[in-house]
Amino acid sequence: MSRRPAGLTLLLHALLAGGAVLMLAPYVWMVSSSFKPSAEIYSATIQLIPRHPIVDNYRTAVHREPVVRAILNSLVVASAETLAVVVTSVFTAYPFARLRFRGRDAVFLMVLGTMMIPAQVTMIPTFILMRWLGWIDTYQGLIVPRIMTPLGIFLMRQFLLTLPRELEEAARIDGCGRLRTLVQVLVPHLGPAMATLAIFTFTASWNEFFWPLIVVQSSEMRTIQLLIAALKQAEAVEWGVVMAVVTLSVFPTVVIYLALQRYFVKGIVMSGLRG
């Protein structure tokens, strides 16, 4: 096996370190600003570490703004949506990966083709449907239209293709039907793919802005992204409070990623083994 030249390795490490710094710099600045008084935030001198760190921005964010309610709303919506997407993706991907029927590949290509349609195209008819159902300004209206995604179906199908057919044959010999084979034999092997899909879905739902902006009408149903947007549109923007709210909003996604990260890379690699 040929060894990589030391100079090339050093260059790659330097590029990776530079990329990491560029990626982390906005987050470091965000956290730093959340502990600064207004005078330091608006100062012309760039100061990464606050000279006089304060927690007033967090105290104001929690006591004056409905941050807790907004985070709870986002947690409910993102958690329910993630669970629903994982379940529907498993059951929808199974026929595409393990069953043989006429038109299977054509239907699967049509499902993948929906990934190319901008979400904004379907927002108006979806909003009309939600209003007809009386789900405007409700959790159902926020969650139900997003419980199935073509990306989830694709990831699960690719992972199911990697599982040996001997698992199903052994289950069939033991008398298991299709549903029992899927739930009790195949699903226990889908941990990495389900964790990967859960991270993608939770992050996308947590950061979603346009659909909640259309459906939510009361301040009680605001998600955290809508609250941040409202704070930025105030007549006198308090950037210290805004940065404190944004910092608090990052924690749930970080916790979800840290909890599932050991499955994340494996899920990505396994889902791309077979086409």
Image (cartoon, grey):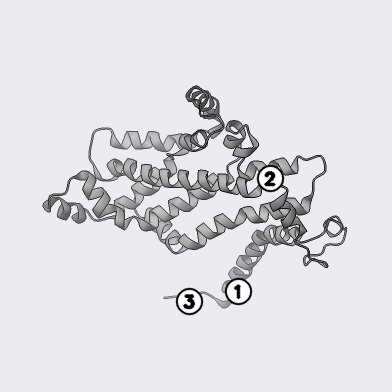
Kind of residue at disc 3: Arg
**Which residue is located at x 55 percent, y 25 percent?**
124
Q: Mark 1: which amino acid?
A: Leu
Q: Earlier in the sequence, mark 1 or mark 3?
A: 3
Q: Give the amino acid at mark 2.
A: Ile
The reply to whether the C-beta atoms of the residues labelled 3 and 2 are less than 8 Å apart is no
Q: Residue at x 51, y 74 (%)?
A: 4
**Which mark, by number, is residue 3?**
3
User: Residue sitting at 73 percent across and 44 percent down?
Assistant: 231
Q: Height in image: 226 above or below 54? A: above
Q: CA distance from mark 1 to mark 3?
A: 13 Å
Q: State the image coordinates of residue 64 (x, y, percent, origin top left).
A: 73, 48
> Quick check: marks 1 and 3 in contact, CB under 8 Å?
no
Residue occupying the point 57% across, 48% down? 72
Q: Is residue 208 visible?
A: yes
- Residue depth check, mark 2 versus mark 1: number of the one nearer the observer: 2
Which residue position holds label 1? 10
